[in-house]
Image (tube, rainbow, N blue to C red):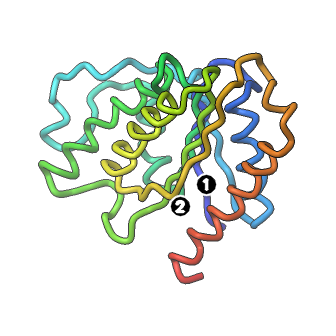
Amino acid sequence: MKTLLALASSPRRNGNSETLLKEFCRGAEEKGWNVEVVHINKLDFRPCQACDACAKDGRCILKDDMQDIYPMVTNSDALVIASPVTFGSLNAQLKMLIDRFQCWWHAKYNLNAPFVPDEPKRQGFFICVGALKRKRYCENAVEIIKVFFHNINHQFAGSLAFRGYDEKGAIKENPDALKEAYEAGKEFVSRVEAIAGE
């Protein structure tokens, strides 16, 4: 059974981004996938210290919950991330997690020993929700995710961006949005299977 790793970054449980993520994962589960959900806000970890100790072997020297996350990314078959858009970018919890993958950057580019093989690339999907309706705010968040996926050898397979949702649970008033996330989950894992030749 293939595993989809789902990273929920919002500190607001059962909020808009997490609700959409649940629908995405429901679609994946109905296609027979196992889903592992990580709530980043529950993790106990420090931000990257820019010490470059990881340049030696591609491994972070900070001993915290991130040491459990790295193998989860390595061992999963695909990745989906959900985040609220905060000040036109990813929220702090997710950005802090991404920065802790500096060790993987060293492993890939300096040591030529990435933890996820470069070919064929794993697939990654992104879901974001913003209160403001300006399109460029979501676009900035997507661009950061694209860079992250590239550095951890995951191909950016697509994204869903919903704007104009601020109140907790407001997205539930839009059944079309929930259905879109659900269908995206099914299509995403089907694509992963097709690439794998299954």
- What residue type is disc 1 on? Leu
Q: Position of residue 134 (x, y in %)?
A: 55, 27
Residue 187, image x, y percentages = 67, 64
* 93 left or right, relative to 146: right
Residue at 33 percent of width and 29 percent of height: 99
Q: Is residue 188 above or below residue 134?
A: below
Q: Quadrant of the N terminus?
A: bottom right
- Say whether marks 2 and 1 touch (CB < 8 Å): yes
Asked whether 38 or 181 is in front, the reply is 181
Q: Quadrant of residue 89?
A: top left
Tell me the tag on residue 4.
1
Circle 1 residues within 10 Å: few <14, some 14–19, many ≥20: many
Question: In terms of depth relative to the viewer, which is nearer, 85 or 163?
Answer: 163
Say left or right for 2 vs 99: right
Disc 2 versus disc 1: distance between alpha carbons? 6 Å
Residue 101's disc number = none
Q: Earlier in the sequence, mark 2 or mark 1?
A: 1
The residue furthest front is 134
Label 2 crowd bin: few (<14), some (14–19), many (20+), radius 10 Å: many
Q: Secondary structure at mark 2?
A: loop
SS for tag 1? strand
The label shown at residue 77 is: 2
Residue plotted at (30% across, 23% down): 48
Is 185 positioned to the left or the right of 136 in the image? right
Indicate the amino acid at tag 2: Asp
> Based on the displayed image, in which of its 4 quarters is residue 47 positioned?
top left
Q: Residue 50's spot in the image, x, y percent? A: 20, 22
Residue 96 quadrant: top left
* Up-down relation of residue 198 to residue 73 (above or below): below
Residue 186 is situated, as x and y percent measured from the top left of the image, at 72, 62
Quadrant (top left/top right/bottom left/bottom right) for the C terminus? bottom right
Left/right placement of residue 192 relative to residue 118 reads right
